[in-house]
Image: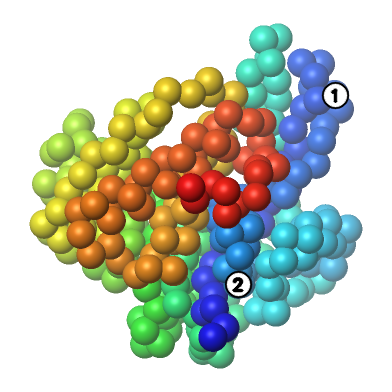
Amino acid sequence: MALKGILSLGDAFIDYVARSSANNCFERNLGGASVNVAVHISRFGIPSYYITKLGNKEDSKFVELEMQKEKINLADAVRTPTKKISKVFVHLDASGERHFHMYENETPDEVVFETDIKAKSFVNKSIFYCGSGTLFHPHARTATKKAISLAKKKGLIVAFDANIRLKRWASEEECRQVIIELLPYVDVLKLSEEELCFLMEVNTVEDGMVILEKFQVPFQLITIGERGAIGRLSEQKVHIPAKSIRVIDTNGSGDAFMAAILFCIHGRGFPHTKEELRDYIALANKMGAMVATKKGALPNLPNYQTILF
């Protein structure tokens, strides 16, 4: 029987990463949190579909070609002649450490609109995944809400990874309010420790998870950096520590974590026992760690089936 796929909604980026600390020569890479997840899903061997807005310039052609190389289905992507792909510039310091230098979006109003979201896109899919990257713009926010509604009607699991970037929002309060309003419609929620504390307006993970309970999100995942991750499913709660690794670049490790969780759910459904919950999070920790030990958000990893064992 053919595998059902995972449908993602997001904004594709191009990352320009400096080749040296002189920061005058850059390597061009496919980027964006939702793109990273879609790529990992495809590499796991799951049909991966992506809704975004592309243009007809060279930058969009680059993104489309790179995603096609990763076997991501762009049949539901929207195309407009004026769209330019957002750019992120990453500089290197003298010690070789990467740091965000500049974000550039020349066409901020060229987003996916509500009318771009079609019911047919949700047919024969098992999971719909999105993040906050399509929530800070009013039109994209409306489109995201429509997508979640259609996903629910079609029986898809709705997965949400906050991936909060406050610089893209008008205010902290708007960001907090918009995301919180979506939580009752989410089946799988991933937050970092910092995102949980920000959204729940607390100082500790423990206090944040107490408040988070009232939103009744069935499957909650909280990543806590080098300490691993916490998972909660109904009354079951586990903490899986992370293994000690030599960190090279944490960019994209959270996306790899999320993709691994979606891979598990796609193949086996929600975990049924505490042991299965531990297995899911242990695999996600492993994926995140593997990405963190290499440069870039989408490094070349060994055959993805070997990651599972």
How far is mark 1 from mark 2, CA to CA?
38 Å
- Residue 159 location (% of width, % of height): 39, 64
> Is residue 107 found left or right of 183 in the rendered image?
right
Tell me the mark number nearer the camera, choosing from 1 and 2.
2
- Residue 202 location (% of width, % of height): 19, 36
Closest to the observer, 189 or 54: 189
> Is residue 210 found left or right of 23 in the rendered image?
left
Closest to the observer, 144 or 3: 3
Label 2 residue SS: loop
Disc 2 crowd rating (10 Å Cα; few below 14, some 14-19, many 20+) is some
Q: Work out whether mark 1 precedes mark 2 in sequence or the reverse, and give the earlier one.
A: 1
Q: How is the rendered protein coloured?
A: rainbow
Q: Which residue is mark 1?
A: 24
Label 1 residue SS: loop
Name the quadrant containing residue 81: bottom right
Task: Tell me: residue 254, above or below residue 158.
Answer: above
Q: What residue sits 42% from the left and 46% below the top?
A: 284
Q: Amino acid at mark 1?
A: Asn
From where the camera sits, is residue 193 visible?
Answer: no
Q: Amino acid at mark 2?
A: Pro
Q: Which residue is mark 2?
A: 47
Task: Tell me: residue 255, above or below residue 187.
Answer: above
Q: What residue sits 56% from the left and 90% below the top?
A: 120
- Residue 181 location (% of width, % of height): 28, 63
- Residue 123 location (% of width, % of height): 52, 88
Task: Tell me: residue 121, above or below residue 247.
Answer: below
Q: What residue sits 80% from the left and 19% below the top?
A: 20
Name the quadrant containing residue 115: bottom right
Q: Quadrant of the N terminus?
A: bottom right
